[in-house]
Amino acid sequence: MSPRPAILEVRDVSRSYFEDSREVKVLDVIRFEEWEGDFVCVVGPSGCGKSTLLKIIVGLDRPTSGEVLFEGRPMRADNPQVAMVFQSFALFPWLTVEQNVAVGLEARHEPADEAGALARKYIEAVGLDGFENAFPRELSGGMKQRVGIARALAVEPLLLCMDEPFYALDSLTAQTLKDEILQLWSNPDLPPKAVLMVTHSIEEAVYLADRIIVIAGRPGRMIAEVDIDLPRPRNRKEPEFYGWVDEIYSLIV
Amino acid sequence: MSNRNDVVGRTGAVADFRSIAKVSVGQIIGLVEAVDEVGGTADAATISQEVDMDLDHLGPILDAAELLGLVTVADGDIRITDLSRKLLSANLRERKTILRDITGRLPEFRLILDTARQAGRPLGRQEILDVIAARVGSHQAEDLFKALVYWGRYVELLRYDSESEQLTLRAPTK
């Protein structure tokens, strides 16, 4: 039996844009892999190309050179095993919580009763039961993002991608949500098998990730790949925690 | 920071259900966690700095946490309670149960639950607003109504349909 391929392989991905026949390079030779059980954060200052990288990884943009493989095959934008959580929540204001969560399932032609059951399962998983028939306008920011997470989990993906998921939230709400995500992540009965999160916050990355891909510069280059082996729950006040934050900070500046 | 009234944005009066009208469960738990992380007690200014939130915004969250019995505030010092520690170590479902027990004891919440129970039928939004206005005055009724719906949904004791504007009692999932 051949060994199982990595869930995600980012192979020497570079991306350039062309303006007036001038090449503007935004990403330069990014290379890393993600295996089952990995919680990886890509961290870097704004403008380093990390959001572009995430778009390429999920198949919404193409690399100028290099490739992205999912379980050994080229990534496709319609891959049902990959789900996304957005910075801006991306909810439909005219749909209820349950309908918003079921949206991705309907797109995959799940029968309505199964879609409803899955939606309710993941609404409960993120603690939103009671809000099934609420509309996004009736929710706090944190609850809107919980809907975004429930929607992503409901398709039971192998890989969950998150693009600055806490960016629009106040720090207290964000912290609570981070802990809830780690709680979900520690439950082996729930998807996904791997997480890839993009953030500008080093502290956030050190709090959440098993491994951090540090990108900096213009074009964005991978300047480090760091394993964070601190036990969870992590305390942001402990010297070991701050040691990691300082170290990564010094890599970027 | 020797006096709790130094904390800008706090009502100063005894906190009631209105204090939780503008804050979310996630903010309250986040605050409790932040205090726990610095050792379980801290002055408001320190926490404000820690969580990068000015006192105007922190005040109502602090009031709400105090109302729910999750922190005590004395002489500007915030201290978490045993109930907080229980909440922090609980999973999502257990948190709901703990907060259900607490909110179920708040008078304004009881008022709505009792009114709905006695009516034995769905209540319209205006009916509830009238009941609330009789208690707290009409200018605050709307905020309180929103808070009751939010918390009632969260602890799964109330169901509200914002299209038909009908409120009903519900039994929690577990």
Image (cartoon, coloured by chain):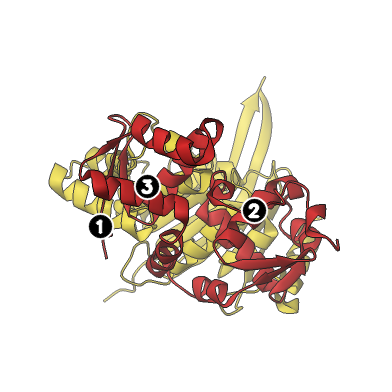
Chain colours: A yellow, B red
Q: Residues within 10 Å of mark 3 (few under 14, many from 20)?
A: many
Quarter in which the N terminus of chain A is drawn: bottom left
Tell me the number on the disc at residue B112. Answer: 3
The kind of residue on which mark 3 rests is: Ile
Q: Residues within 10 Å of mark 2 (few under 14, many from 20)?
A: some
Q: Is residue A84 visible?
A: no
Chain label for disc 3: B
Residue A130's spot in the image, x, y percent? 33, 51
Q: Residue drawn 32% across and 51% down?
A: B114
Chain label for disc 1: B
As helix, strand or loop, the secondary structure at mark 2 comes to helix
For discs 3 and 1, the disc positioned in front in the rendered view: 3
The kind of residue on which mark 2 rests is: Ser
Q: Which residue is mark 1?
A: B171
Q: Nearer the viewer, residue A241 or B51?
A: B51
Quadrant hosting residue B161 = top left
Q: Residue drawn 28% across and 39% down?
A: A99
Q: Which residue is mark 2?
A: A171
